Image (cartoon, coloured by chain):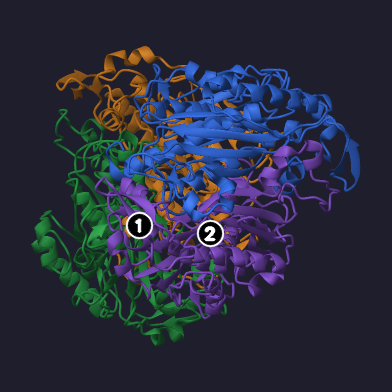
Chain colours: A blue, B purple, C green, D orange
Amino acid sequence: MSSSFGRLFVVTTFGESHGPAVGVVVDGMPPGIRVTAADIQRELDRRRPGQSALTTQRQEADQAVVLSGIFEDVSLGTPIAIVVHNTDARSKDYGPLKDVFRPGHADYSYVAKYGVRDHRGGGRSSGRETVGRVAAGALAKVALATVGVRIVGGTVQVADVRAERRDWDEVEKNPVRCPDAAAAERMAAVIAAARDEKDSVGGVVEVTALGVPAGWGDPTMEKLDAALGAAMLSIPATKGVEIGGGFAMTTLRGSQSNDAFDGTRYTTNYAGGISGGISNGADVVVRVAVRPATSIGKPQTAATASGGTTTIEIGGRHDPCICPRVVPVAESMMAIVLMNAWLRQRALRGAEK
Amino acid sequence: MSSSFGRLFVVTTFGESHGPAVGVVVDGMPPGIRVTAADIQRELDRRRPGQSALTTQRQEADQAVVLSGIFEDVSLGTPIAIVVHNTDARSKDYGPLKDVFRPGHADYSYVAKYGVRDHRGGGRSSGRETVGRVAAGALAKVALATVGVRIVGGTVQVADVRAERRDWDEVEKNPVRCPDAAAAERMAAVIAAARDEKDSVGGVVEVTALGVPAGWGDPTMEKLDAALGAAMLSIPATKGVEIGGGFAMTTLRGSQSNDAFDGTRYTTNYAGGISGGISNGADVVVRVAVRPATSIGKPQTAATASGGTTTIEIGGRHDPCICPRVVPVAESMMAIVLMNAWLRQRALRGAEK
Amino acid sequence: MSSSFGRLFVVTTFGESHGPAVGVVVDGMPPGIRVTAADIQRELDRRRPGQSALTTQRQEADQAVVLSGIFEDVSLGTPIAIVVHNTDARSKDYGPLKDVFRPGHADYSYVAKYGVRDHRGGGRSSGRETVGRVAAGALAKVALATVGVRIVGGTVQVADVRAERRDWDEVEKNPVRCPDAAAAERMAAVIAAARDEKDSVGGVVEVTALGVPAGWGDPTMEKLDAALGAAMLSIPATKGVEIGGGFAMTTLRGSQSNDAFDGTRYTTNYAGGISGGISNGADVVVRVAVRPATSIGKPQTAATASGGTTTIEIGGRHDPCICPRVVPVAESMMAIVLMNAWLRQRALRGAEK
Amino acid sequence: MSSSFGRLFVVTTFGESHGPAVGVVVDGMPPGIRVTAADIQRELDRRRPGQSALTTQRQEADQAVVLSGIFEDVSLGTPIAIVVHNTDARSKDYGPLKDVFRPGHADYSYVAKYGVRDHRGGGRSSGRETVGRVAAGALAKVALATVGVRIVGGTVQVADVRAERRDWDEVEKNPVRCPDAAAAERMAAVIAAARDEKDSVGGVVEVTALGVPAGWGDPTMEKLDAALGAAMLSIPATKGVEIGGGFAMTTLRGSQSNDAFDGTRYTTNYAGGISGGISNGADVVVRVAVRPATSIGKPQTAATASGGTTTIEIGGRHDPCICPRVVPVAESMMAIVLMNAWLRQRALRGAEK
């Protein structure tokens, strides 16, 4: 089950970066929901490469083909298979890297695990695997909208530059996908500088779910926090996640971090909308630490399969900062988590909650 | 499955804080491993209340009773059920709280989810649920030791005080479970001050696995990072988790955060021992953000079930800082994650890897 | 997960025949359902040994102790742990059998699988494991009754004697648990004869669910037929299962076995209430082939752990025909299957269906 | 998870009968195994329609396209996605059936479950879904062969005609796939007669696994019997399953049905190679009851969506007996079950067993 996420809304991705295709099977989409090819394509377009000068120049149309589960623009309740063919796979770029373990990449750990690997473009470890997640997330978003849940997200930090505002309508207006127009400009400059120095930078992506009713999530092993943690840390290049107040709460006192609640609304949200693993009616807020992209042009020393080391300069076409493209992926994973929580609560209580 | 963790080494906890017992069933312990009652009790003793003046004064012997799966001190490969009876459950303390939603607690979200709840001591949402996790973790540690994997952990931050050293032998010598003796004293003072002011403080717990071979973990949805993220964020009162460099990496460049590796050893460990979701042979390092304990004696405004608000001062017996007791729980959850990764790798490749 | 059944109503049993206890954890019981200790005990009493001269004379009170998940006779929605202590475990009876692989038993296959085993009374392979299933089944029955589903069952064949009638009210009135009083007498005679010859006989148990609405079950891999097949063949000593017309349909033509349906009711039920894996509104009918009990007093040649053979006469206290005691177990497994199907349909569609 | 089977070798099918494609994702194929497109196509060719005058005349090339998980004819250990496009989908044939619930089919139960359906050719309930199972089974067979396990199967009964011999080399030589050449001729005559009368017949398919070592399978809820029962009863049109002696054992005595075993070999195999849910080293033998095909040309009364009834004569292109085409499907499901049992045993014990 290493490639599946969820129990009731089950998302299974497949595909290698330079194989024939990547894709996803979504099992558990409720029937009778109107969903069109455009709903899926719109989200894939947010994730695809080549959107701006700040992202990789690999050219992929990332055209989704729906093979099953949707009939006359309505979900059937049966598995929805979606395939995206790889078209701009320049496998030759990777010939020289066949026996080199690129620093920061999973080349070595894959060989340790499997004994074999498709070395072209990272194979299965490529960020291209997230195409399937975004297609699945698009379905989840459409389904969640039927019960008033909406998911927004953006890049809230790049290197040392932090967004001060959360103007979600701003996100699609700048290439960084930052909800703060002023910060976005400074972030773009930082990314461009790193790119020009053949280096990369990290950042933080924040995702928020609006309209989640109280009562979703599970109380112990599958707390909503835990499910979100797994979801976010399953995204390539993420190395940290925090809910609500997160690490900042570790320096507070309980009298500060216990959210004020009058039975109807919260005036603070240190809990990030989740109490005891269960949604409490406030916005569900998650932040994800995104490491600097591992593929950089600068010369690096790398180990080789034969036991020695070599110096490499990774050419290819890479993202100097992957935050802008992580945004739709993180939104998708949150949508998938919430779909599961929603359906599970329906199983537990029956009526819509 | 809300109360289960893992697929191959499956840990299912049960029990309410003031019900007859808490416990766990562990399904998937490999057969033929020598394990004694003392192995389990030793870990439970690290978690139990009343260990020092810095923890709750609730008195629970937390005596483990093994009901199955171990015969003549050897694991049978069948489910191991372990029960710990609740003995010092002063349910009367909670009568007045029956219709009050304690700030920061899960009282309200539980009612939203289930419609009913056992209000005594938080019922299922109590930290007492972690007794079962620690018993299961004890089994996991014993099993992992047979392949040379050892797990260590400690409190590395309390409020603003941070440990500078990682002297794991120091941990059990101070009540904070800090791997830095000097920092431990300052942490203890901070905790005592909060306690005296009827308040609480948060902190950070760090857990490290030594001796994990390269190749454990899964590459996409069930990355080792993701499994650890879920495991840690399933522990009560945790609101953040980071692997290796974590959030600190977000301000670095790729040329800094790509770990140097000569094919044999790493000289840096920003990846926290995990590349592409798979262990890479370096130490696996996780840090968990622990919020300030939510039960405090200070007067707080709380919502009531009848729709109004009231002022409460939570008496009872509570921890002013739960980090010292989270340490064995976090270690246990890491052990459970690694057991699953180990068994899964055996399934994939057969021979020990 | 070898000891768990179900995804949403998850039943995990534990315990060896001659260990301290057997029991079960049920995770997924909907909250707010009234359930008493008597509801559980009544079903356990139907399964326990020593009920009549036709069953084993092992004396076990099989007293259920509920450790969690039920508070003031109402389900909390949290895991319900139930323990039954073993009291009449005469382990000494089994000393001589420590190194003998009893014919028809799982002694040899257990050693092949695990390398070790608790040889006393079959250990985990004992029918005593089904205590936990029946306790879980009792909960499932109580929950299903809230939506009008009732499960009945009985012994419909012993050796060559077949029941001609399905008078479910008759079942608890005769020791064979046969729904045909006249056949019951002949069955009892056949069982007594086998017992007196230190031998055993097999038979068929039939279980029916009344009141299942159309739409429960899944269409492909988890057809309701498949779930029932797994459930029934997970009961010790079962070697066949059939739904509705079952094997008898193999000699019919489609024009005979296509059930007549006018949109409201079925006048035949070859499909056993399941079409395409999904309930169709008719009674759900399952029959289970129960092999003759493997423990017999007659001399048998048996292999030994040292590689030779020996002659054994199994003394102990055994059932000459286990059908009467399989009835409550089969009913329980059907109830567990239907609970999962019900909750899953709620997840899929929301409102009660 | 309704469309997935297995925990470690996870098979997820997708696709409707008259949609763009059917297919499968197999997650858990061990890496490093040589597997070619021909290995997959050979099995699909055994299942595809139009093979003889005894099967449906729908013309589908059923050409498999591998999208991932295999690189240079070697399995990568990553998900293997296989797609088969539907080419001869005459959807117009089904227009008149849009609002009719065909007798014996799942039309009504699907509407009850989902509220919507793809009515063309049964949509998801079509036997065409099994294309994905057979592709997955081909992978499983290749993998099992590396440890000496081989799976054979055939039609052993059609209506009242039973095979007396089990000459597995004979199976592919006759259109009935019967392991008894003489019986095959009589079976073919029976099928042709039913076809000419616009009717259909049922039968029994038997599948055997050779070379399974002792120790595979689980002891309680996931007994090998149970897994095989679920696997077989998940195949469309099956309504019964038996292991080894099956229903015939119900009329025997224990002294007859306890298999004779000298520690090395069995001289009888009433247990069908499975003791206590675990393989015992003998051949694993399963028989499946296949009902008469539900699509028949004879006039039948059928309920309609509007609440009335109508008379239908199902034209289209259908199988008068589906046993010959069930054979590769049943073999595939057994292979999938055994793959899971094998990998699980590796997880439990490490070394090959």
**Marking on residue B9:** 2
C295 in relation to A163, above or below? below
Q: Nearer the viewer, residue C17 or B28?
A: B28
Residue type (three-letter) at the residue carrying disc 2: Phe
Chain of the residue that carries numbered disc 2 in the rendered image = B
Q: Which residue in the structure is indicated by mark 1?
A: B312
C273 in relation to B60, above or below? above
**Foreground mark, 2 or 1?**
1
Q: Is residue C65 left or right of residue A277?
A: left
**Marking on residue C44:** none
Inspect this view and state whether residue B70 appears: yes
Disc 2 to disc 1, C-alpha distance: 42 Å
Position of residue D219 measured from the top left corner of the image (x, y, whole percent): 45, 63
Position of residue C23 measured from the top left corner of the image (x, y, whole percent): 36, 68
Q: Is residue D124 left or right of residue B285?
A: left
Looking at the image, the residue that sits furthest to the top is: D92
